Image (cartoon, rainbow, N blue to C red):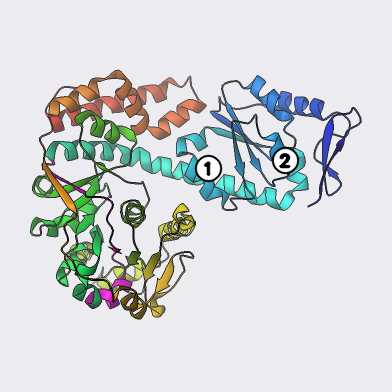
């Protein structure tokens, strides 16, 4: 598009895009002032984001009228970058076409849902196609943020209690001696894992094996002993995959929010993962427990990939990462949840019917696939491969190269076997008093309540005078305090 800056009738600068004015040709500043005067916010927004404000005449009026809000802009092109300096932040659509993912990567759900988005109306008309794409992305990001916040409102309480179980039951702690100068193989439980099983078994001492929780039974059944298992899920069913670890000496990497039974935590060697936020981070700091950095992700395979990129220096191989629904079993067998489910199969609710339902499209897989495709790690020089045979390829992860068994064996044939000794070990005895003292601090209590009730606090930001929400938060908090006190045997 041809963009021209010229003088308006009153001598101020104005802009034309393909001979269409982006600002008034008579008084651009006055036009921006009138726009702001007419703008009414339904709540006290934490941020105001205006889409393609052109020469940014609107900015000082927004800052004056809404001093409590940070002001940002979404740029549709790079022609107005000289007018960015006074904004609090700038988002460039022309650099991040997947704006939905970009918004979700830089703002939390709470931040997005307390942000007010408004268009500079002439830009909507002049950049009509781009504008439509941008506003669709904004709408989708807000919808998904609301959905995630509803999910978090439910799970945050579980994650909080899981954290207390974690810190009061872990006894044997380990960490990696970093960096690890070895190739790493991450094993997920997709059916595409099966063609690689024999090669992995016969060459398992050539690389570090990180096994995700749902694939543990497959590995053990086939004589593969992972160097490390990883589980991040906070739900009860995730712990079913970990049952086999009662009989196997394999370290378990997990965040404090993940669920693991007390008896298993007391037996296992645990590699603590810290996301660096929330109450669990306060706990790690308070009790001075060493943890390795991890990144939150909707799927454990995403967390595992970023863990490998952080602590390992050589090739990363992903196996069993199908990212698509399959015919029949959705996981390589044996799978602990399948073993549990088949106990309830009968003539009316048969196994075939159950498996057929599992074949239907799974929206979460599409979300996870898009995360892998758009992950910033693709900008690095790391070699990341997905092990998958041609017949199993129902999708592509773009920058992650798909290789078959022959390619994998060629890439790893010159790797030599070695003794796997990557870990340091430590016995710990965490004082429960330190945890109870932390929970009694007023600043921790306030931040924790916002963490446990994120949806309620967003609603409160929109309706600050709503006493029913405040009362609901306080009532729920009292119930949670009782449960927390029972877990650590202390009054809170």
User: Could you tell me which secondary element the residue under label 2 belongs to?
Assistant: loop
Circle on res. 142 = 1
What residue is drawn where x is 29% and y is 36%?
A: 157
Q: Residue furthest right?
A: 9
Question: Residue 154: x percent and y percent?
Answer: 33, 40
Place residue 429 in its image quadrant: top left
Q: Position of residue 488 (x, y in %)?
A: 14, 30
The residue sitting at 23% across, 20% down in the picture is 440
Dot 1 falls on a residue whose secondary structure is: helix
Circle 1 packing at 10 Å, graded few (<14), some (14-19), many (20+), is: many
- Left or right of 301 on screen, residue 169: left
Residue 6, given in percent of the width and then of the height, sits at 86, 38
Is residue 334 in sight in this rendering?
Answer: no
Question: Dot 2, crowdedness within 10 Å: few (<14), some or many (≥20)?
Answer: some
Q: Is residue 191 magenta?
A: yes
Does 330 lie within the magenta span?
Answer: no
Residue 121 image position (x, y, % from top left): 74, 39
Q: Which residues are magenta?
A: 170-198
Q: Nearer the viewer, residue 305 or 126?
A: 305
Is 21 located above or below residue 43 in the figure?
below
Name the quarter where the C terminus is drawn.
top left
Quarter occupied by residue 82: top right
Q: Is residue 208 visible?
A: yes
Q: Which residue is denoted by mark 2 in the rendering?
A: 80
């Amino acid at each position: 598009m041809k963009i021209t800056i010229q003088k308006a009738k009153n001598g101020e600068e104005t802009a034309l895009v393909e001979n269409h004015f982006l600002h008034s040709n008579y008084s651009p500043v006055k036009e921006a002032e009138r726009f702001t005067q007419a703008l009414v916010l339904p709540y006290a927004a934490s941020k105001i984001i205006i889409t393609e404000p052109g020469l940014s005449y609107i900015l000082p009026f927004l800052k004056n009228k809404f001093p409590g809000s940070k002001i940002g802009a979404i740029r549709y092109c790079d022609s107005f970058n000289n007018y960015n300096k006074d904004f609090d932040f700038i988002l460039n659509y022309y650099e991040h076409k997947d704006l939905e993912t970009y918004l979700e990567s830089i703002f939390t759900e709470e931040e997005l849902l307390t942000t007010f988005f408004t268009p500079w109306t002439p830009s909507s008309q002049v950049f009509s196609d781009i504008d439509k794409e941008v506003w669709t992305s904004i709408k989708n990001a807000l919808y998904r943020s609301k959905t995630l916040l509803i999910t978090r409102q439910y799970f945050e309480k579980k994650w909080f209690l899981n954290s207390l179980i974690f810190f009061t039951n872990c006894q044997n702690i380990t960490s990696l001696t970093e960096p690890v100068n070895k190739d790493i193989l991450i094993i997920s439980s997709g059916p595409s894992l099966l063609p690689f099983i024999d090669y992995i078994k016969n060459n398992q001492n050539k690389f570090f094996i990180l096994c995700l929780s749902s694939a543990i039974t497959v590995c053990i059944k086939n004589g593969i002993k992972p160097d490390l298992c990883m589980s991040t899920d906070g739900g009860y069913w995730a712990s079913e995959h970990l049952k086999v670890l009662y009989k196997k000496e394999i370290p378990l990497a997990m965040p404090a929010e993940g669920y693991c039974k007390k008896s298993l935590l007391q037996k296992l060697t645990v590699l603590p993962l810290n996301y660096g936020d929330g109450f669990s981070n306060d706990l790690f700091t308070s009790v001075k427990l060493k943890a390795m950095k991890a990144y939150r992700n909707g799927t454990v395979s995403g967390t595992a990939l970023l863990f490998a990129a952080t602590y390992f220096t050589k090739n990363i191989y992903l196996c069993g990462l199908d990212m698509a629904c399959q015919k029949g079993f959705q996981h390589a067998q044996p799978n602990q949840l399948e073993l549990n489910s088949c106990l309830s199969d009968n003539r009316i609710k048969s196994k075939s019917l159950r498996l057929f339902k599992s074949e239907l499209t799974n929206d979460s897989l599409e979300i996870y696939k898009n995360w892998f495709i758009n992950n910033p790690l693709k900008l690095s020089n790391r070699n990341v491969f997905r092990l998958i045979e041609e017949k199993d390829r129902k999708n592509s992860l773009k920058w992650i190269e798909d290789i078959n068994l022959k390619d994998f064996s060629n890439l790893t044939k010159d790797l030599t076997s070695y003794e796997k000794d990557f870990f340091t070990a430590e016995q710990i005895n965490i004082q429960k008093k330190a945890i109870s003292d932390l929970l009694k601090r007023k600043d921790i209590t306030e931040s924790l309540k916002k963490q446990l009730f994120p949806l309620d606090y967003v609603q409160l930001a929109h309706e600050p005078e709503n006493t029913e929400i405040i009362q609901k938060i306080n009532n729920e908090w009292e119930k949670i305090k009782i449960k927390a006190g029972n877990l650590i045997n202390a009054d809170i």
